[in-house]
Image (spheres, helix red, strand yellow):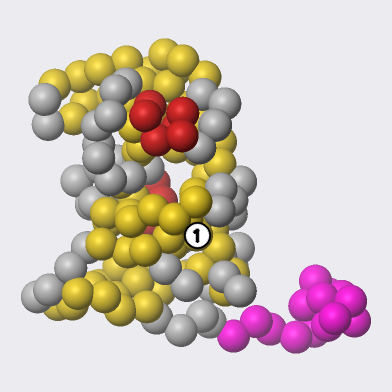
Amino acid sequence: MHYLLGLLLAGVVHAAPLAPYQTLGTLVAGQINQQDVIWRIDTGASEVVISQALADQLALEVRPKQGRVAHAQGQVWAGSAWVNDLVLGPWRIPALQVWVLPGDSPHQPLWGLAGLEDLVLTLDGQQMTLEPRVGSGIMPHL
């Protein structure tokens, strides 16, 4: 294992792209800090967003009032938190900053455009396909 990792780091062995993940609709099972969640892939959201209620449930350290966030009901001051343990479908995602909206909305965590930077998203009717970009740091979730 250490030998293979050393070869990967040295560039001798090239990692194969991860297989695409397909689902009907925009809901994807995942985890935040080992707690199961259902992500909503939301290309209308610029960031990865969770509610304060979910942040409290996950015991995340939220930095309050980091910026104003626009949403369907207007604008609101939002906090932010870094999450090191994220799973989206079959993949483990590198650490990511999430925006935390006050209260219990959104009811489902939203995987917005900031979270899609390292993924290729294809929609064909109700069929959604996600595929990590090579070199993104996204790994299989074992």
Q: Position of residue 61 (x, y in %)?
A: 57, 26
- List the residue tagged with mark 1: 87
**Can residue 90 be seen in the rendering of this structure?**
yes
Q: Is residue 117 magenta?
A: no
Q: Position of residue 18 (x, y in %)?
A: 51, 80
Q: Position of residue 44 (x, y in %)?
A: 19, 46
The residue located at (53%, 44%) in the rendering is 96
Q: How many marks?
A: 1
Question: Residue 40's image quarter?
Answer: bottom left
Name the side, left or right, on which 34 lies relative to 112.
right
Q: Is residue 121 above or below residue 47?
A: below
What quarter of the picture does the C terminus occupy? bottom right
Q: Is residue 51 above or below residue 115?
A: above
- Given residues 66 and 60, the one toward you in this image is 60
- Given residues 62 and 17, the one toward you in this image is 62
The residue located at (52%, 19%) in the rendering is 63
Question: Residue 55's image quarter?
Answer: top left
Q: Position of residue 115 (x, y in %)?
A: 41, 51
The residue located at (12%, 31%) in the rendering is 72
The residue located at (39%, 53%) in the rendering is 37
Q: Is residue 13 magenta?
A: yes
Secondary structure state at the residue bearing disc 1: strand
Q: Which residues are magenta?
A: 1-16
Q: Is residue 53 above or below residue 23?
A: above
**Can residue 117 be seen in the rendering of this structure?**
no
**What amino acid is labelled 1 in the image?**
Val
> Is the residue marked by circle 1 packed among few (<14), some (14-19), or many (20+) residues within 10 Å?
many
What quarter of the picture does the N terminus occupy? bottom right
Name the side, left or right, on which 35 lies relative to 72.
right
